Structures are given as structure tokens and as C-alpha cells.
Image: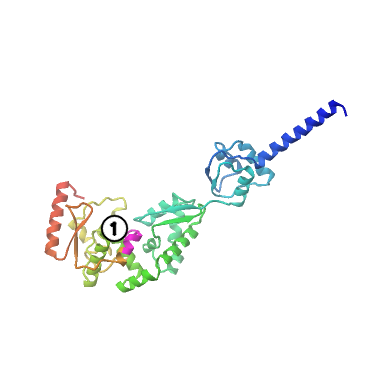
């Protein structure tokens, strides 16, 4: 065999090797240049995904080429965490199977169902309108002895792991399961010992939540309201008055000071005019507020007033005369601060 034929054979072997290598690299080589969080919407095509990958892929066109080779026409909707060095083969397989990565969502105490839905919609694919409609579904409410007001209580502030594509119905079910799990045997026994239902515990906890942000005070506040309930006294809780005002004026209405005229509002949430607990919770209480009710401090306090000596805390009293002195001191302080509403 002469040298010319040898060179030709060597050339084609080299060319074949290069083509084979390039072919392999397109499919199995490292394609993604950094860790990315990829969101694929229901309206996204492969071309849309390719555009989203352009700043993170060595060759976005090869993504489309591999997709075509694997007969993938449309990616599955989802949130995908894609690691640096991922190949087009693995990426296409991931998008074809919908092998998305779950995420952790969290929420704290929300004043209204609408605010809560908005908070969740910021973290998952579902919009707030579809979430609210699902939460207020009549069949669901009836089955679980809930109302459009009380349904807020099944959402226990915490961190939960879900898929970005979770449907409103599945999200609602997950929250209901977590709510039932939260009410374990220990908590149920404590509620029974207090003579309260789960609904009543959460309603009282929502008032405690609004009364004080200090976790150390919450068992004291809870004990005070329990004392009033036992005596069949009105709770006289300002947060319920603020809630009633916002029901009339709108949630964005700012109330920095409850006025005497406000105490005459005709509302089932007016705990100055009505005895017992209001019909439902006034906000979403967190776990510390709920457990503060279940583990309320045993004392003889019946009155409380915001402290002017220790801002953010309260002065507690056993007698009306002492409370009136505390209240007068606080009102004087508010006037000095120019807080009229």
C-alpha cells in the first residue's frame, strides 16, 4: 500500500473521529455553564426554553438539535434546578419527563385570605384569583365545617415543600393535612381542658397575635382573655374593633388609635358590645400565638394597656382602678405623640 492511500485512510479515520467526538459532545458533553433555576411556563415552546438558556449554554442551538433527535416537541411545565455541566441529553430528558425540583415556600401570619393568596402566588405558578376561588369553594367549606371567614385558620404559618406547578386544589389539600397534623393529641387535650374547640382556640390566638408581638407576653394575654371568658365578661379587645373598622372602611384603612366612638360599631366582631369570642379569627395566628392560648398563664389579670415605659409591651392589672390609671397614662402619651387616628 503506497503512502498516498495510507494518508487518505488516516485522514478519513481522523475526520470520523472528530465527527464522532463532536456528535458525542453535542449530546453528552457539558452544555450548561453554571447552576441555573429554569422556569418553564405552559405557553413555552422549545424555542422559548432555548432563549432562556442562551446565557447559560455553550451552544443553545444544540439543545434544539438534541430535542429533535429525541423526538421531544414540547417541554413539561415546571421549575428545574439545572447543575453546571449538565449535558443536553440529560437536560432534554429532564424537560421531557417533567422531573422538576420541589421548592420551599413559606408564609407568616396574614390578615386576610386575599393577602395570603397573594403571598402564595408569589412563590408558585398558580395565580391569586384561582387560589382564592379554591379556598372559598362551597363544597370544600361545607365538607370541613368551614366558612369563607374561618377557612383562613387551616393555614398554619410555616415552611412547606411543594412543586412550583402544584395546583390550587392540591395546595389546599396539603395545607389541610398539615392543619390536621398540627392538631395532635396533645394540643387537642389542652384545648379540651380549656373548654374550647379548635376553632375557638385559633380565634382567640388571632386576637392574642394582634395584641402583642412579644412571644413572652402572649401566654399572659391569653390567660387574661380566658379569665374574662370564664367570668362571661366582654373581651374588650381593641384588635377586634380594628378588624371591624377595616371591614367597613377597607383593609388599607390605617387605624393607629381606637376611639370611643369606634366601640359603638355594630358588628359581631365588636368585643366591647358582645360577650364571648367573635365568629371567626381576625387574622392568621402563628404557632406561638396558638400555643400561647393552649399553654396560657394562670393569673388574676383582667385588664391590659399598652405600656409607655416599655414600648412594645403591656401593663397588666387585676383591678379596674389600676387599669384606669394605666389607660389615662397611655392616652396622655398618645395625645403628646399627636396620634389621633
Residue 120: image location, x then y, percent: 43, 53
Above-or-below relation of 61 to 168: above
Identify the secondary structure beneath mark 1.
loop
Q: Count the labels in the image.
A: 1
Residue 43: image location, x then y, percent: 56, 46
Q: Is residue 135 visible?
A: yes
Quarter of image, res 304: bottom left
Quarter of image, res 291: bottom left
Q: Residue drawn at (39%, 65%), measured in percent from left and top?
A: 147
Above-or-below relation of 53 to 287: above
Q: Residue 127 lies in magenta, yes or no?
A: no
Q: Residue 283 lies in magenta, yes or no?
A: yes
Left or right side of 303 for 205: right
Q: Which residue is mark 1?
A: 215
Q: Residue drawn at (64%, 45%), measured in percent from left and top?
A: 89
Residue 262: image location, x then y, percent: 21, 57
Name the foreground residue: 131 vs 223: 223
Above-or-below relation of 284 to 3: below
How many neighbours does mark 1 have within 10 angstroms: few (below 14), some (14-19), or many (20 or more)? Answer: few
Q: Residue drawn at (37%, 54%), measured in percent from left and top?
A: 108
Left or right side of 19 for 97: left
Which range is magenta? 282-291
Amino acid at each position: 500500500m503506497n503512502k498516498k492511500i495510507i494518508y487518505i485512510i488516516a485522514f478519513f479515520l481522523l475526520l470520523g473521529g472528530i465527527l464522532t467526538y463532536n456528535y458525542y459532545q453535542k449530546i453528552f458533553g457539558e452544555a450548561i455553564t453554571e447552576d441555573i433555576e429554569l422556569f418553564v411556563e405552559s405557553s413555552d415552546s422549545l424555542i422559548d426554553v432555548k432563549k432562556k438558556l442562551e446565557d447559560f449554554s455553550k451552544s443553545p442551538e444544540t439543545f434544539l438539535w438534541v430535542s429533535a433527535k429525541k423526538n421531544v416537541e414540547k417541554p413539561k411545565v415546571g421549575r428545574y434546578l439545572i447543575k453546571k455541566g449538565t449535558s443536553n441529553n440529560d437536560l432534554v430528558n429532564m424537560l421531557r419527563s417533567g422531573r422538576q425540583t420541589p421548592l420551599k415556600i413559606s408564609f407568616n401570619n396574614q390578615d386576610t385570605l386575599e393577602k395570603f393568596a397573594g403571598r402564595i402566588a408569589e412563590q408558585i405558578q398558580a395565580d391569586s384569583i384561582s387560589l382564592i376561588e379554591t379556598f372559598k369553594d362551597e363544597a370544600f367549606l361545607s365538607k370541613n365545617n368551614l366558612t369563607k371567614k374561618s377557612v383562613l385558620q387551616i393555614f398554619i404559618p410555616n415552611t412547606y415543600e411543594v412543586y412550583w406547578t402544584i395546583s390550587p386544589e392540591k395546595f389546599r389539600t396539603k395545607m389541610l393535612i398539615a392543619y390536621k397534623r398540627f392538631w395532635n393529641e396533645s394540643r387537642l387535650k389542652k384545648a379540651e381542658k380549656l373548654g374550647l374547640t379548635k376553632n375557638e382556640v385559633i380565634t382567640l390566638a388571632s386576637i392574642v397575635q394582634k395584641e402583642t408581638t412579644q412571644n413572652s407576653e402572649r401566654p399572659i394575654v391569653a390567660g387574661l382573655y380566658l379569665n374574662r371568658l370564664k367570668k362571661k365578661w366582654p373581651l374588650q379587645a381593641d384588635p377586634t374593633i380594628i378588624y371591624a373598622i377595616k371591614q367597613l372602611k377597607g383593609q388599607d384603612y390605617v387605624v393607629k388609635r381606637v376611639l370611643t366612638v369606634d366601640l359603638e360599631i355594630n358588628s359581631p366582631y365588636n368585643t366591647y358590645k358582645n360577650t364571648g369570642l367573635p365568629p371567626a379569627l381576625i387574622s392568621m395566628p402563628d404557632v406561638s400565638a396558638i400555643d400561647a392560648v393552649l399553654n396560657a398563664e394562670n393569673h388574676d389579670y383582667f385588664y391590659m394597656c399598652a405600656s409607655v415605659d416599655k414600648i412594645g409591651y403591656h401593663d397588666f392589672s387585676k383591678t379596674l382602678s389600676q387599669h384606669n390609671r394605666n389607660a389615662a397614662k397611655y392616652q396622655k402619651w398618645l395625645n403628646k405623640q399627636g396620634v389621633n387616628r
